[in-house]
Amino acid sequence: MARRGSPARLVIAVSIAAVLAVFLLYTSIAGGGTPSLSPSELAGRTGDVSLAGLVVGPVKGDAHAGGLRFKLRDIEGAKKTTVAVRYTGSVPDLFRVGRHVVVDGQLLAGVFVATPGTMVTKCPSKYSALQPPK
Amino acid sequence: MAELGRAALLVTLGLAAYALLVGAYAASTHRRRLAESARNALVASFFSTLVAAVVLAAAFVRDDFSLRYVTERSSKALPTPYKLSAFWGGQEGSLLLWLLVLTGYAALAVWLNRRRAADLVLWVTPVLGGITVAFAWLVTGVASPFATHAAPPDGLGLTPSLQNPYMATHPPALYLGYVGLAVPWAFAMGALLAGRTDERWIVATRRWTLVAWASLGIGQLLGAHWAYLEVGWGGYFAWDPVENAALMPWLAATAFLHSVMIQEKRGMLKVWNVVLVSLAFCLSIFGTFLTRSGIVNSIHSFTQSSIGPWFLAFIIVAVAVSVALIAWRLPLLRSRTKLESLVSREAAFMYNNLLLVALCLTVLWGVAWPILSEAVRGEAVVVGRPYYDFFLRVFGLPLLLLMGIGPLVAWRRASLRGLLRTFLGPSVFALMVGAVLLALGAGSSIPGLIAYTFSAFVIGAIAIEFWRGTTARRALSSESWPAAFASLIGRNRRRYGGYVVHFAIVLLAIGIAGSSAYDSVVEGRLAKGESLEVSGYTLTYARLVEREASNATEVRAKVLVNRGGADLGTLEAGKNAYSVEQQVSNEIGLRTDYLRAEDLFVIAEQVNDDGSVYFRVFVKPLVNLIWLAGLVFLGGSLIALWPDAREQRRLATRFAEAATPAGSAPPP
Amino acid sequence: MTAALVLAALLTVAAVVAVAFPFLREPEPATDVVGELDAFERRRLALAEERDRALAALQELEADHRARRISDEDYRSLVGPLRREAAQALQELDVERQDYPARS
């Protein structure tokens, strides 16, 4: 086992390559993240996306019974497009009309059906409290 | 008094600039008194920053709402400890805290080393001065905590979830870590500038690195514990970019702590060590950039402020300086020693480094990809939890195993036969544990079972190390078992302190595996009197109570807990409504069963108008091992940190033998 | 507020004094040169480091052998090269010292 230099270099190079291979394999199979869209960009998109918007009332329903219904509007920009959202699962404490929220899900028949428990709120002021993602 | 604060920060800026410019000049022209003067400037900058910090703290305590910063996060009703912690509750104040810790560390580092590493301190002073200038500029010119306005009668109050001992202590602990990484980096750059390629800079900064690394670790655990108790979604770490911002430098620093041992023992990896310490430091600046700039879609983000570009510029400068200096001194740093065997402790440390850096870069990619994607492709993406969980397992589990292998392998070259003999005991133990756990049902999660089995292996390995060391000590000195054990640790603080830290990481791994791979969750809506069952517990919703606290209205659902017929008491879960801050917080009900080693975690998600409550209940096995791991981690770090007089003497002798440069002799 | 201004002024004066202190203390110093290690001293430092490393490795080998981390045969195969390395390092340091005595 007392050889010098080359086996070590080779093994290190192979290990680095192996790590890289694992990484590339994973990202090519599982994809490079979920697209993050604003309500105005949502039209026509299929598949799982992450929707980020401003909560617009009225807020109806029950997230634990039948689904919470509200609308989301673009956070920035002048576009007035709103998207109807139906959400089930945990609702963060900071949720209310006027808050920024991010929620994962799919656009189905004109309504954004959220994946349960994926709503996250963002407090627009300086130091926000951490809100649960699930 | 705001003028005093502002003036003090200007003095800091001036002193730091002096330390940087005059220090660099003095170092390149070898002028002793000028170098001392620059060093004094750096030390003095701590005191002027301290004045500013005291002014701000006093403003909070005295309810001085003429300062805009105080108005925005304090109120008359806030308890005094939280008035003090509100100091670092926002951008400007936390930058001031950062500056205070930085100047404190810098002053101490150059003062303690002014004689015994004088030629290093010569160059370290301008480097630390440069970093101080950057942060001093931010608090004077860009985000000053001393902005004034017409004082309103009362402040806006502190976000309720920050009014918690964990959240109060989490930022200072983190900053002791983040900022602490500046010292080893500055010494590394100083050594490169001075052309010193020996291990002096490593030895001088070893304790600093350990303190910074331990603080960063403890700070993250404090944050995780806060998230578990206060945010209350049932978890403690969400791979949020801001959480990752602290994890990345910690991983790089962990790799660094290990690879410096290789340089000390074998004289190898000099280039790699400088690269690692630069990576750790740049990641810590990057981390603070992420947290403050609003560039990442994070639920933690401070504010969309103008401070982002400045941090970006700072990172670019730090990276450029590191790369330039390393490239310049590359020929000097090359060492003759080669890796002799792939089965050796050096090799084990290299694998350890590879995995740690791989994990660190994976996390970095997960954080940076959304930013890059938006900037380059115009399409925003979000990197979710599965990505991080996958790589944590793929890189983390082998790392766990390595923690048991490394200490048992000899330096330079280990014979395979000797290894197999050494590993036999821990391997058998691990397989037995694995089999027992499999029989108990742990096969429901393969990664969890692997984690448990590897943990058993590491525990076996650590136990063997302590056993061997103690018996050898007894053979030498015929002490009793406890005395031998104590003197063993006392004489080999770094090694055995390190083993204690490894044990802490094992506890952490077991706790994480238990609480994430083997937890149970049940949810449902209960009217008064109804029950639900989870993992053997029966919870009955008794009634709703509402009461007034000093700054909030508390609504609680009282829940009776029962297990197998035995009454285990009552839990309360609900919400607090804070009047001043106009916010609602989640208050969980928690019952820790120490015998069964699990937590019963009750969330009252929604209180309905008809008095029924929607509950979400978790049973989290072994989660408290995570917090216990923090304590063990602290203990192990303290053992490893404890000063060793013999080593100091050895280093002093070596330096004295080599030369007596005029600068290192005591002044006449 | 005058109190604030007075304190600020005091702070500035203190800062200036701290910075000027080395010059105030030694207006006419014997030497004002802070030594950097020259090439000879660096080499000697590097050799001393190698010597210390070799000696420490030997010590650790002994300790590991006593604690039975390393078997007898492994010990025998490792101790020879280590002793040679330590001897070589000591010799190189001696040669260096003889050829280039320490400067002061």
Image: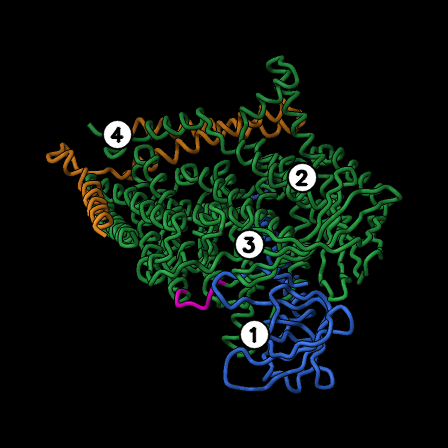
Residue under pointer 3:
B551
Give the magenta-colored segment's residue range. Answer: B302-307
Magenta-highlighted stretch: main secondary structure?
A: loop
In the image shown, does B451 or B55 lie closer to the viewer? B55
Q: Chain of mark 1?
A: A
Graded by Cα atoms within 10 Å as few (under 14), some (14 to 19) or many (20 or more), the crowding at tag 4 reads: some
Residue B546 spot, x, y in % from top left: 68, 55
Task: Please state the horizontal and vertical placement of residue B585, each as a whole percent of the image.
Answer: 61, 58
User: Which chain gets the blue colouring?
Assistant: A
Mark carried by residue B665: 4
Q: Chain of mark 2?
A: B
Residues tagged by mark 1 and mark 3 found on one chain of the structure: no
* Whole-percent x, y for residue A35 in the image: 62, 75
At label 4, the amino acid type is Ala
Residue identifier under label 2: B404
Task: Please determine whether, in this image, residue B477 is positioned above or below residue C52.
Answer: above
Identify the residue shown where x is 30% and y is 43%: B47
The alpha-carbon separation of the residues under discs 1 and 2 comes to 53 Å
Q: Give the colour chain C carries in the figure.
A: orange
Instruction: Say what amino acid the circle numbered 1 marks.
Output: Gly
Location of mark 1 (residue): A98
The span from disc 2 to disc 4 (Cα, nearest Å) is 45 Å
SS class of the residue under badge 3? loop
Q: Mark 2 or 3 closer to N-term?
A: 2
Looking at numbered disc 3 in the image, what kind of residue is underneath it? Asn
